[in-house]
Image (cartoon, helix red, strand yellow):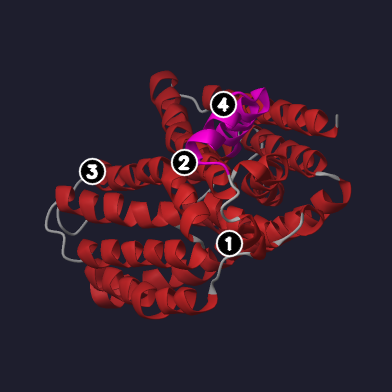
Amino acid sequence: MTEGWSNESAASIFSISMLVFAFGSTPGGILLDRFGPRVVFTSGVLLLALGLLLSSQARSITQLAIAYGIVGGSGLAIVGLGPLAANISAWVPPARRGRAIGVAFAGTGLGSLLFVPLVTQLIDKLGWRGAYVVLGLICLLILAPLLALILRKPPSSEAKEGKINSVRGNWELLTRNPLFWVLLLVSLMALGPLRSLTVHQVAYIESVGIERQTAANYVGLAGFLTAGTFIGWGIISDKFGRATAFTLGALCLLGAVGCLILLRQNPSTMLLLSYAVLLALGEGTRSSQTTALASDIFQDNGLGLVNGIVGAMFGFGAAFGPWIVGRLRDSTGSYLPGFAIIAAMIIFSIMGVLVLAFSRRR
């Protein structure tokens, strides 16, 4: 970085942010059940704006860790995937819940397509500090007012107000239910494999003899396709069941791992294209179908609480999965042990979803 900070120190900021996201998702979900989306999501965006603006003034790694990692990470936790899915599930009945969450989560992919080039341009013209200021002002002056004006409590939460168990009561009911612990396992294994691939994919593809820019182009293609796969799998899950959509998507993700392994023997563009398509198909079910299934099974225990816990498990998996794969790569000199761990996590997630779906059907 231009400040003379090491890459390792700079990368640690994002790890801190992910851990704060994990620890903050459950409180964010509890607050959503209590106060509704207008207050909670607007507050989350204001926290994110504050974190970005403070980051622009950071003069040390410690200051940046506090501003971006803790303040900004707290805002991201409150408006993260878990609370977002909880709010959608409160508005939409189970028969249409899969596609509704899929459409919403598709927005994350489209947002990346729009904001990654925008941020790149801002950094080139204004520097990284100026880019943080612009992003913070977008959150403060555009996003926060929109959320404050548009969002309101779902009808279902208004109807149940005063009748919902306390947070402590809901938590006790959840912890006594074996299916809840299966859900935690599935949630932990949902984003762990995916983020392990996305963090290490370009370095691995480059290591087999393919140019870095070519690798980045195909990774970008996967990101572009993901927006459509979220919606497509959501429709399939509403028609054929969450377990069907999740399992098919997980098998696609296993196929993506297989393509990476084959690239070492045959570094061809056809394999890269197959990898991009399979990765996009795999990503389209991991978070969306897990939150949809959690909402279907545990909606009487507080959608915010349940999906906040799911979001926390997403964060822990995303934080530690890439680290484990990187550690294995450093200690063995090969990515194959890490790929084996990724495949095992995917298989465990399939088994867990099948248990949840079968138990719910019974």
Is residue 218 in sight in this rendering?
A: no
Marks 3 and 2, how far apart at CA: 20 Å
Lower position in the chain sequence, tag 4 or tag 2: 4
Q: Nearer the viewer, mark 3 or mark 1?
A: 1
Q: Determine if the magenta segment contains residue 188.
A: yes
Label 2's element?
A: helix
Q: What stretch is highlighted in magenta?
A: 165-190
Lower position in the chain sequence, tag 4 or tag 1: 1
Label 4's element?
A: helix
Q: Name the residue at 46% across, 69% down.
A: 115
- Residue 143 placed where, x, y %? 44, 75
Tag 3 residue: 9
In this view, 314 is above or below 119: above
- Residue 258 placed where, x, y %? 68, 33
- Residue 183, located in which quarter of the rendered image? top right
Q: Name the residue at 52% across, 39% down.
A: 309
**Residue, far left:** 59
Q: Mark 3 packing: few (<14 Cα in 10 Å), some, or many (20+)?
A: few
Label 1's element?
A: helix
In this view, 125 is above or below 24: below
Label 3's element?
A: helix
Marks 1 and 2, how far apart at CA: 18 Å
Contact (CB < 8 A) between labels 3 and 2? Answer: no
Please tell me whether the stretch drawn in magenta is mainly helix, strand or loop. Answer: helix
- Residue 227, located in which quarter of the rendered image? bottom right
Q: Name the residue at 82% across, 29% down.
A: 358
Lower position in the chain sequence, tag 1 or tag 2: 1
Marks 4 and 2, how far apart at CA: 20 Å
